[in-house]
Image (cartoon, grey):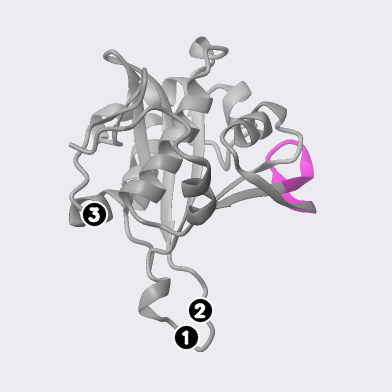
Amino acid sequence: MPTPFAALAARRGVAFPLRAERLTLTPFAADDATAVFAFCRLEEVWTWTSGRAGSADELREQYLATGDRLTVRVDEAIIGVGKLAVQDAWSQGGPREEARNAQAEIGWTIDPAHAGRGYATELAGALLEIAFTGLGVRRVEAEAFADNAPSLRVMEKVGLRHEGTFREESLHLTRGWVDGVTYALLASEFRARGRLLRDIPWT
């Protein structure tokens, strides 16, 4: 069963909010739904994400149920949302303790009104930092539609490695069957290249 990142963070002594160079990250809260839905409802946003919520209430319910979203602010303004889904790794012969919470999937969405300022790259780097340094996972993955060029550039900028392109694996709401890609990074690789952003304070 996936562990919500906030619960794992609390067990490891990671305190929110967390601040990157310009961004402040907090676990998604019910009061954030209206501001987040305002940009997630835009076609230019949901066409590249995993789904489309029909209302702020629906988005609130989804995000609180999964417990894997972070609200992203610049100063006091909500400008994006991040995904940090901690997962158990597959282990041969059934569940093993060392496979618990061993990997994570990350994702990012930035309000188009704030696009072009490097926020997505900063957010992706911060999510890697939180996953590896804060939560202690050993592997991080990110997935996207294969023609989502801006997101693929972000993955490459923060050092994620292309692991596969999967032909017509995803049924899009409006575009039919489309290709998907997976990028990933191991904790050992992340440590070897050093931190991608300035240090994130953990208190």
Measuring from the top left, give residue 178's x and y in whole percent: 78, 44
Measuring from the top left, give residue 75's x and y in whole percent: 28, 13
Q: Is residue 162 left or right of residue 82?
A: right
Viewer-side residue, 50 vs 117: 117
Identity of the amino acid at label 2?
Ser
Residues under numbered marks 2 and 3 in contact, where contact means CB atoms less than 8 Å apart: no
Between discs 1 and 3, the one toward the N terminus: 3
Can you see residue 165? yes
Q: CA distance from mark 1 to mark 3?
A: 24 Å
Q: Circle 2 sits on which residue?
A: 91
Residues under numbered marks 1 and 2 in contact, where contact means CB atoms less than 8 Å apart: yes
Measuring from the top left, give residue 176's x and y in whole percent: 78, 43
Q: Circle 1 sits on which residue?
A: 94
Main SS, magenta residues: strand
Between discs 2 and 3, the one toward the N terminus: 3
Find the magenta span and give its range. 167-180
Residue 1 covered by magenta stretch? no
Q: Is residue 113 left or right of residue 17?
A: right
